[in-house]
Amino acid sequence: LINVTTLSPLHYQGVRAMAEGATHDNYRLGLSYYGLLDSRLGMSVSAYGSFRGGYFRNNYNGDKADRERLGSLRWKTAWRPVDNLLVENVASYGHTRQNGYPYFFEDTDEINYNDTCFYKRTTFTDGLTVNWSTPYFTLASITGFQYVNDNLTLDQDFLPESYFTLTQKQHDRSVTQDIVLRGTKGGYSWLAGVFGFYKYANMNAPVNFGKDGIDNLILGNVNNMLPAGMALRWDQDNLFLGSEFTMPVKGVAVYHQSSYDWRNFSFALGLRLDYEHTALRYRSHSSSSCTMYRGERPLGSVSVDIDDSDRLSQHFSQLLPKFSVTYNLPHSAIFASVSKGYKAGGFNTQMFSEFLQQRLKQEMMGNMGGGQGGRPQTVAEESSDLVARLVNYHPEVSWNYEIGGHFSVDHGRVYSSFALFMIDCRDQQLTMFPEGTTTGRIMINAERTRSTGGEFTLGYSPTPRWAFNLAYGYTHAVFRRFSYNGSEYKGNHVPYAPSNTLYLSATYRQPIKSTLLKSIGFTADMRGTGEIYWDEANEYRQPFYAEMGANIRFELPCGSLDIWGKNLTDTRFSTFRYESMSNSFFQRGLPVRGGLTLRLDFMSL
């Protein structure tokens, strides 16, 4: 869970501003006002905007493939009608427009695709929080609403040829409600609550095949089976595969946790009962025709009209326990915990275009062979059974074990924390890109995985002017049992999980006695990541890489000015890699860059 809190106008009144300019035409602007209408009612209004010129160019049209424009507004109201009651509401609006995606084709080491790519999203969220405190308990109610309207349009083959494009338009509306009751008496504390949500989404995701896609992905296998001199040709220049979805999801959970302090020990026991129901109503449709030729002489045409629809549903329930014990010492603590984790299953909507392609081939071959009189209905029934079998993916369940602690010595000048963990996961949900000419991606379940590792942080401030920080994480995530489509992956690394993460920084701050400048600070840092495996077979990986950064901060009487640089060694690395139609694509990390960031804070007196 992520709890996002914003500055309250009841505690701060004034104006905050931020402006940033960086290399590669990157700019950010932000402005916030916090004020009181009376002693118990405050409001704040914030506006933010950014423009990213882009780092990578599409060689096909010369445009930057990762250009982005973003804007947002936020309005927060905080009201304390009486001392023990606080009501807060945050309403936010945001709009994002991005160019297509900077995927490099491995064979040419360049971005070069011909069809339009962009992502556009408009969001509105509203969160109402009510906190009521009494001498015996506190009651909190958190109500949320979210609206998302987005459009993902991309050249899905990312090649200069016209294979196929995807447009995915989605409207999401969701409501959440959480009620939490807390209480404390002596060494015993407890919390109990109920959580519910409802989400309703409509999605229209058509795939449009161009000439190269029709010839190679649709007709290629069919024509290879025909006698010499005969060929099947599509009558249109494109093939439209329509997919429309309605996806209602709802769920409810009740939970309780009790904690008890005894001497230096703290014990906590929690239990959560979770229920979720998800449904999918789909319609897959296509209308087209093709003609059989002997040489250049047409032999006959066949129309293929498909319109399939159905409703699928799944429901999940799970009981999730949690136990932890902590041993507290002055300025330090050691803990151990055991908990059960869970993620509900769902539906593979991106597989429907593949199902529809197979239906077209079956109908086309059946009609060309004269197999009428009931065959189309049989094919439709077989397709419906195939969808029911393959479109579902199952819930993911894990047991999580962790021990760790933290300590502070030398009057707080040295602070450290550590943790060792093991996650035993069954039916882990994993995104795969199927082999061969299959398009799209699919969510499947890996039978069993295990992740072990640890994290360590160390902070050292020998003097008020110097500060050193170290953070290191190690993860060994492997498949303990997993086979798919005849391939065995047992013992391989789980994709996308970095084996090592490292952060080092050193900061020096020099106070300055001046009316215009309070101090100057210098920071040097290093961030390291890797290795990362990109596929289940572990054929592709990103070795460990490091990025160097530096920052000079001028602390002003009413803010700060930062001069910064990132990836100063211009390290080249990949942040993502995948395969489509037996082609490999990757996305590069950002190159060397630098900029200026000005922050101003005019606090009311």
Image (tube, helix red, strand yellow):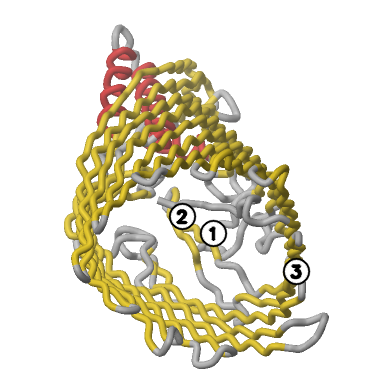
Within 10 Å of disc 2 (Cα), the crowding (few <14, some 14-19, many 20+) is some
Residue 105, disc: 1
User: What amino acid type is highlighted by mark number 2?
Assistant: Asn
Within 10 Å of disc 3 (Cα), the crowding (few <14, some 14-19, many 20+) is some
Q: Secondary structure at mark 1?
A: strand
Using the rendered image of the protein, determine whether residue 483 is visible from the camera's viewpoint: no
Q: Quadrant of the C terminus?
A: bottom right
Within 10 Å of disc 1 (Cα), the crowding (few <14, some 14-19, many 20+) is some
Choose between 367 and 465: the one closer to the eye. 465
User: What amino acid type is highlighted by mark number 1?
Assistant: Phe
Choose between 27 and 210: the one closer to the eye. 27
Q: Label 2: which residue?
A: 583
Q: Label 3: which residue?
A: 598
Precedes in sequence: disc 1 or disc 3: 1
Position above or below: 200 against 501: above
Using the rendered image of the protein, determine whether residue 296 is visible from the camera's viewpoint: yes
Q: Secondary structure at mark 2?
A: strand
| Residue 342 x/y as whole percent | 27, 46
